[in-house]
Amino acid sequence: MQTSFTLAQLADPNVAEAEKILRSCVHCGFCTATCPTYVLLGDELDSPRGRIYLIKEMLERDAPATPDVVTHIDRCLSCLSCMTTCPSGVHYMHLVDHARVHIERTYRRPLFDRALRSVLAAVLPDNRRFRAALALARLAKPLAPLLAFLRLKPLAAMLRLAPSRLPQPGVTSGRVFPAEGLRKGRVALMTGCVTPVISPSINDAAIRVLTRHGLEVVLPEGQGCCGGVVHHMGREHDALAAVRRNVDAWDAEADRGGLDAILITASGCGTTVKDYGFMLRSDAAYAAKAKRISALAKDISEYLATLDLHAQSGMGGFVTAYHGACSLQHGQKITREPKELLSRTGFVVKDVPEGHLCCGSAGTYNILEDDIANRLRARKVANIEKVKPDVIAAGNVGCITQIAAGTTIPVVHPVELIDWATGGPQPAALRGTAITAAAVRSAEAAL
Ligand code: SF4
Ligand code: SF4
């Protein structure tokens, strides 16, 4: 694609990077077929190629974003399916990230949108605020239909997504879990912002699996949200502050006690942490440290795949629909490992039709763009139910919440199933279900 930036514009390294990406697009349109918003809406401007044109024009003009451009960029899920499909290697993620920063700097959203985004940016990345907000949301849940009627749909979406019960808060930082038996290595576990509040069982399961297999697990002091929530809203300053805080925490831990890896159970966060090196590439004080952290970052499945897991007998046979989170399959190109781990530990793994399409979760997307998110969830759940699973496994807490809101089939993280199969407790989401009764019978028969 030809571009016409001025030399003055290209002096900005972010614009220069965007120009490089734009020039790599040959407008072939292969990406349109696998873009969820194009598949649903059929509008070229809601396809990757259409958005790339809009971003090019917006950046070349160096003018404030227009409402039309904002609409189409806001509708992008950042699912990165287009990056998997593109034969020319267009780095759409870095391009749309930059476009979102430009929009945030130059476009004044309506008052309600601004307020809503400010609240989400202040609440979601903070464990305590998020827990308090969910406690309130739980009480206000019955008001969801009224809010939807009043056209306050994002508020209604928030209430509908809020869990009806809140678990005890999970561990977050400043703890060390010793290895069982001979210590074979030492890893950090990034606990994240949302997971310890709504699904602490995921990190608990990861810690058990790791320590059971000889790893010391440290939750470094000072770690927090990866910055992804605000990064995807274009709030660059807030995102980079979160990134620097984590880099400091993990870099100090790596120097102090040594780290073989930094493990992440939420693939959305993992994609962001793996990009820290790029995000801080122009920061002389942090560039090298951030690169080190990105190199250490691994999805939990990526790391477990390197271990010799000790699965117990008698747990197997349960049909598990594997939902590949977009951030895992498109963002990190991890497709095989979670399924192989589940197979190795005794589960019958089924791929889901249209597995490349997003479930509609996408960070705050299911709040801010709830119509499209709901349609994508309905389509995802219908596809999952076609394989008649006993349980659904998804490696991202956002996907788990989104899919669970549309089905009665239990949805868990693969590491919870792996923990169960290697000697841990039954995942809480399975308790009282038919799968639990069957597992107990199967385990008793194996004795
Ligand atoms: S597939 Fe790649 S090169 Fe082709 S239009 Fe899409 S982004 Fe551009
Ligand atoms: S990131 Fe996803 S929604 Fe956005 S343009 Fe690419 S395929 Fe479409």
Image (tube, rainbow, N blue to C red):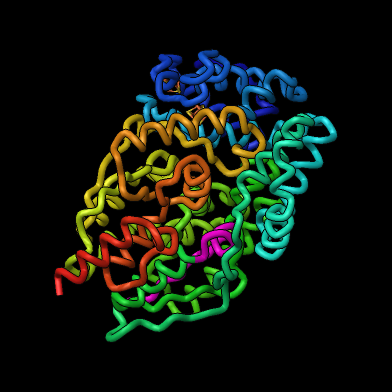
Task: Give the total number of marks visible in the rendering.
Answer: 0
Residue 276 rendering spot, x and y as whole percentages: 53, 52
Q: Is residue 109 left or right of residue 90?
A: right
Which residue is farthest bottom?
181
Q: Is residue 276 left or right of residue 349?
A: right
Q: Magenta segment: does it hold 196?
A: yes
The quadrant of the picture occupied by the C terminus is: bottom left
Q: Residue at x 14, y 70 (%)?
A: 446
Q: Position of residue 19 (x, y in %)?
A: 56, 27
**Residue 324 in view here:** yes
| Image: magenta residue range | 185-200
Residue in front for this viewpoint, 95 or 347: 347
Query: Height in image: 320 above or below 219?
Result: above
Judge by depth and name the residue closer to the eye, 347 or 93. 347
Q: Residue at x 51, y 14 (%)?
A: 42
Q: Position of residue 417 (x, y in %)?
A: 33, 60
The residue positioned 44% from the left and 46% from the top of the image is 408
Residue situated in front as seen by the camera: 224 or 7: 224
Residue 171 part of the magenta segment = no
From the viewer's perspective, tell me whether residue 429 is left or right of residue 109: left
Q: Position of residue 43 (x, y in %)?
A: 55, 13
Q: Nearer the viewer, residue 403 or 123?
A: 403
